[in-house]
Image (tube, helix red, strand yellow):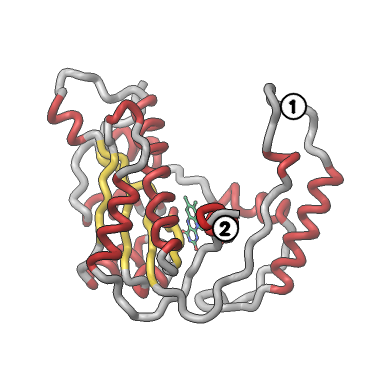
Amino acid sequence: MNNTLKLLHHHTSVRSYTNQPLTEEQREAIFKAANQTSSFSLLQAVSIIRITDPDLRRKVMQLSMNQPYIEEAAEFWIFCSDFHRNHQIAPEVDLEYIEFLLIGSFDAGLMAQNALTAAESMGLGGVFIGAVRSNINELSDILNLPKYVIPLAGLCIGYPSGNKPELKPRLPESMVLHENQYQTQTLDKLKLAAYDKTMLQYYENRPVSAPFTVKKVKGWSDHIRDHLQRSIQPQMMDYLHKQGYAKK
Ligand SMILES: Cc1cc2nc3c(=O)[nH]c(=O)nc-3n(C[C@H](O)[C@H](O)[C@H](O)COP(=O)(O)O)c2cc1C
């Protein structure tokens, strides 16, 4: 197996870092990897905001469910869908179509993943922070985001402290990969039960490490029931409209 595959097959999120900073060379290499990512029609509708000011970093952490690794990581980058640049070039185009939300979000996600993979290839670790969207209006204010720019996810990057976390098991190929047409038959209860058991064992064996204080012990189905509900952000539609997105 080649080194790229080995790296991708062994991804785990890292939430605990030493205080060693990245070199300028490392930071540039990660940026270059992200910036060379495929881009829908080369619209390049993404901006990254690198948070270096410690006070600002603390505020971002507080607005993002107080996750301490946001403050501790050597680097914290926020990936934004950004049509502000494109709008300045072509102000006559109506950007309120929902397709632009899809384009910007997909491109930002691809760039963010390439940044993380690049970091991991250098022995660094990282974790995405979707919680940057939990107080999205306040975050947009402190980041001075103009119309057509929305923050989608943060990325912590740093040197892992301690051992790398255990690989988190994923759904089996047969539940995720469809051939030719979507397989609409009801969820295979046996396969789901087997994955629930795998995840339960994973959580049972996983040591409780900071910032968590309570051991999570549940199967994947229970995790889904909890987290689907928690993921709802009722303010999002109004926010998107305010930023000029997804009105039609
Ligand atoms: C878009 C996105 C947002 C995420 N947001 C958070 C977050 O706010 N806090 C966190 O600790 N992990 C976050 N994660 C990490 C996921 O929890 C993690 O990827 C998932 O549990 C799988 O674990 P693994 O990456 O170690 O394999 C996020 C991941 C993605 C892709």
* Above or below for 87 versus 130: above
Q: Residue 189 falls in which quadrant of the image?
A: top right
Q: Which residue is mark 1?
A: 184
Q: Residue 132 falls in which quadrant of the image?
A: bottom left
Count of marks placed on residues:
2
Which residue is at a point 32% across and 63% down the rendered structure image?
A: 76
Residue that protrudes farthest toward the front in the picture: 2
> Mark 2 belongs to which amino acid?
Lys
Which of disc 1 and disc 2 is earlier in sequence?
2
Nearer the camera: disc 2 or disc 1 = 2
* Above or below for 156 versus 185: below
Quarter occupied by the C terminus:
top left
Position of residue 6 measured from the top left corner of the image (x, y, whole percent): 57, 58
Seen in the image, is 28 located left or right of residue 152? left
Instruction: Out of 205 and 166, give the one closest to the viewer.
Output: 166
Position of residue 80 measured from the top left corner of the image (x, y, whole percent): 31, 45
